Image (cartoon, coloured by chain):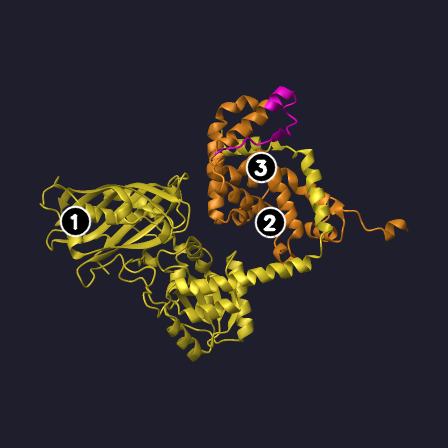
Chain colours: A yellow, B orange
Amino acid sequence: MNPEEVERLLGRVEPAPPPQPLERRVLAAGERLLNREPARRRIWGMAGVAAACLLLSVVVGRILVPRPGDPGWAPCRTGVELETHLDAALADKPPAFPTIGPSLDAYAALFHRADAVKPLPQELGWQRIPWVTNLEEAQRLARNERRPMLLWVTSDDPLGRCCGCAAGLRAGPLSREEVVRRISTEFVPAALDKNVLPGDFLKSIRGQLPQYHGLWIVSPDGKVLAGIEKRITEQSVLQTLDAGLKAFGPVAPRAVEPVDLLRGRGAGLQRDGGVSLAVIARLMHKGARDGPVAYDALHLSAQEWSAFAPPARTEGTSWTIPDGVARKFCRILSPVSDEDLTPRPEHVSQSELRATIASVEGGAAMVRLTGRWEAEHSNSEKKKVRASATAEGLVVIDLEKNAVRSFLLVAGGTYGILPELRESGAVVEWTANR
Amino acid sequence: MIAVLMPNPPSAESSDDELVGRYRSGDLDALLTLYRRYSGPLYLYACSLAGASRAEDLVQEAFVRLMSAGRDRLRETIRPFLYAIVRNLARDESRRSSVEKGHAPALALRSVSTEVDDPESRRRLEQAVAGALDRLPADQREAVVLKVYAGMTFEEIAEVVSIPQGTAISRYRYAIEKLGQLLGDQKEVT
C-alpha cells in the first residue's frame, strides 16, 4: 500500500468520543477551580517557593560545580579533537584526487556515494561569514568599528560536533544568502562555545536576555540588544538583526574576508607528520540526505597513518589495518552532531578495516578499503545509542614518493537511540594537496 | 433588547483565548466548548501514550492545568499546550511505573467512511487501523496521532514532542511506510 493510500485509509477513521463521564469530571473540576481562592495568592506562594529553590540551586551549584579559576576546573572536552575541514568550493565536486596518473573511472560509483552524503553548496553559506572564535577579539573589533556583535553561542564547538539545533542552524538559516550578507556586512560575528566563555560574561548576557544558547546581538560595552533561541528561521533571524540594529543605531557597511577557520583539516600533513581527516556524516533516507551535516575530524598520528602504507607493491597485496587505528574511525558511525551521541573507540564492539592493492599503474597504487564497525554506548541521559556501518574506500599511494596522495572512505549503516534505528551515511576525506 | 444585554453564548467559532477568558469570568459553558473542541483527539493521544485506563485522568488534568495556568504561560496556542501537558504527565507516570512500559495500547477509533456502510466492514476497518497503529514504535505512533488525528503541523509536533522539525517529519514518514506494509493485506477493507 503506498503512502497516499495509507493516509487516505487513516482519514477514514477518527478518534472515538471520550467516555461521557470524562466530560462531567472536567466540568466539575473546572467549577471547583472557579470557586477557589483568587489565583493571585497562589501565584505569590509559588513564586516564593520558586525563588527559594533557585537560591538553593545556585548555592549548591556554586559549591559542587567547579568554574574557571577554581581548583580542579577543566574544560568539558579535554582531549577530544573535534575540528574539521570542508572546502566550500569543492562541495559539489569529487574529492581532490590526482588528475594525472591512474584512471579513476572504475571508482565512479564510490564517488557518487560520497557526493550523496556531502553537503550541498547551499548548506555551506555559514562558512562564508567572517566568524571570529574569540570573545575578546570580537569585543575589540566591535569597539574599533563601532558596531554590534552577533554572538552565536552553542553548547559545544560551533565549528565541529555541537548540539543538533546548532547543526540545523548551520545548514539552515545561517546559510541563507540574505542572512550571510547581513551578518557579514553589519555585525562582528563570533561563533563561541559556551564552555569556554568567561562565566561572568555569559551570566551577564543571560541576565539581560534569558536564553540557554542561540544568537545574541550585543553592543561593544556588553548590552544585549536582541536575541533569539527558539524557532530560528531565516525570517526570525532577519527580524532579530533588524531589532538589534534598531536598538544600536546605523552602522557603516563592513567588508571583511572570511578566514577559513577549518583550514588544515582534510588536507596536508600536520607538523608532527600526522593527518587530520575530514569527517562528515548525516542521517540518510533511502540513500538521500535526511538531516543536517555533522562535521568532525579524525586525527591520526604519523605512526597510525603509516598503517595505510602497503607492505608490498604488487597487485592483490592485502593487509589489515591495526585494530587501534580502525577503532578510531568509529566517529563515522554517528550521523548526528551531538558529541554525547557519538561513540568513542572504547564503545566499539567490532571493528575491521582491510586494505588491498587493486591495481598499480602510472606510478600509483590504488588501494581498496573495506571496513565494518559496531558500537553501543549510553549517553548522559542513560539512553542506549547503537550504531553499525560498513564502508568502502580508496587510497591512492604515490609509489615514487612512498606517500599517500589521497584518501576516501564512504560508509553507510544504521544509527539510533534504541529502539529507533535510522539510516546513516558518512564520508572521510583527505588529500595531500592543501 | 434582552439579546443585547446578555453575554454572547460561546460558539464553535469563538477563539481559544476568548473561551479561556470567558471561563475565567465564570462562564462554565466556555470550558465545555473548549473541551468538546479538543477532547476527542486529545483522549486518543492520551490512550496512545498511557492506555485507556489512564487516559481519562491525563485529559482531565490537562484541562485543569489549562484553566489554572497564568496568562504568561498561555502565550502559545492552547492546542500544543494541552498535548504537551498530556505528554509530560504520561512520561512522568511511565518513569514512576514500569508496568506499562513498552505496552502498545489499543486505540479507540471509529469509522467516518460513507463508502463502507455495513457495521461489520466498519468494525473491520477500525480494527485494522487501530491494530496497525498499535504495532508501530511509540515515537512513530505518536507522530501519526498528532499529525492525522490532532491535525497538527510538523512545527507544532516538534514543539510538543521537543524534537527538531526534521525528526518529526521523518518519524511520520517512517510510520506511514510501515503502516503501508502492515495494512498491505487489508486492501479488502479499503
Span shown in magenta: B103-123
Query: Dot 2: few (<14), some (14–19), or many (≥20) neighbours within 10 Å?
Result: many
Residue at 50% over, 60% down: A229
The answer to whether residue A211 is visible is: no
- For mark 3, give the secondary structure: helix
Residue hosting label 2: B81
Mark 1 or 2: in front is 2
Q: Is residue B37 magenta?
A: no
Q: Count every numbered label the image shows and give the total.
A: 3
The amino acid pointed to by label 1 is: Phe
The amino acid pointed to by label 2 is: Phe
Do the dots labelled 3 and 2 sit on one chain? yes
Q: Residue A430 location, x and y as percent?
A: 24, 54
Do the dots labelled 1 and 2 sit on one chain? no
Quadrant of the rendering where the C terminus of chain B is positioned? top right
Query: Dot 3: few (<14), some (14–19), or many (≥20) neighbours within 10 Å?
Result: some
Query: Dot 1: few (<14), some (14–19), or many (≥20) neighbours within 10 Å?
Result: many
Query: Distance from label 1 to label 2 (Cα)?
Result: 56 Å
User: Which mark is on residue B54?
Assistant: 3
